[in-house]
Amino acid sequence: MSKIKVKDIDVTISTDNGEDYINLTEIVKTESNGDQLLQKWLSTKNTIEYLGVWETFRNAENFNLPEFGVI
């Protein structure tokens, strides 16, 4: 894993199948209300829909789409 610096914050870059990903919690942890910001973002309809699409493509074998629909 490598790191990049974003506004003086070290952010870890994870790689999976040649794709790079960053950790959002590392970015918001320096904000005074970072946990609330992340919680709010995770509860929006668009984010939940995105996570469903992501899991459908990236975790198709283990993703329980009908159960996810309840969310």
Image (cartoon, rainbow, N blue to C red):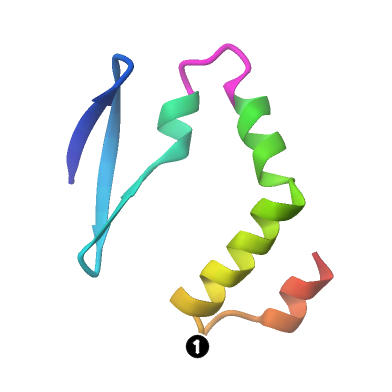
Q: For mark 1, what is the residue?
A: 61
- Residue 17, quarter of picture: bottom left
What residue do we see at 58% from left, 11% from top?
32
Number of numbered callouts drawn: 1
As drawn, the residue found furthest toward the left would be 2
As drawn, the residue found furthest toward the bottom would be 61
**Mark 1: few, some, or many residues within 10 Å (few <14, many ≥20)?**
few
Magenta-highlighted stretch: main secondary structure? loop
What residue do we see at 75% from left, 82% from top?
66
| Up-down relation of residue 14 to residue 4 (above or below) | below
Q: Residue 19: within the magenta?
A: no
Name the one closer to the observer, 49 or 29.
Answer: 49
Q: Position of residue 64 (x, y in %)?
A: 65, 81
Q: Position of residue 5 (x, y in %)?
A: 24, 24
| Up-down relation of residue 1 to residue 54 (above or below) | above
As drawn, the residue found furthest toward the right would be 70
- Asked which secondary structure carries label 1, the reply is loop
Report whether 68 appears left or right of 23: right
Quadrant in the picture for the C terminus: bottom right
The segment highlighted magenta reads 29-34
| Up-down relation of residue 12 to residue 15 (above or below) | above
Report whether 52 appears left or right of 25: right
What residue do we see at 53% from left, 15% from top?
31
| Up-down relation of residue 68 to residue 19 (above or below) | below
Q: Position of residue 22 (x, y in %)?
A: 35, 44
- Residue 63, quarter of picture: bottom right
Report whether 28 appears left or right of 13: right
Q: Amino acid at mark 1?
A: Glu
What residue do we see at 61% from left, 27% from top?
35
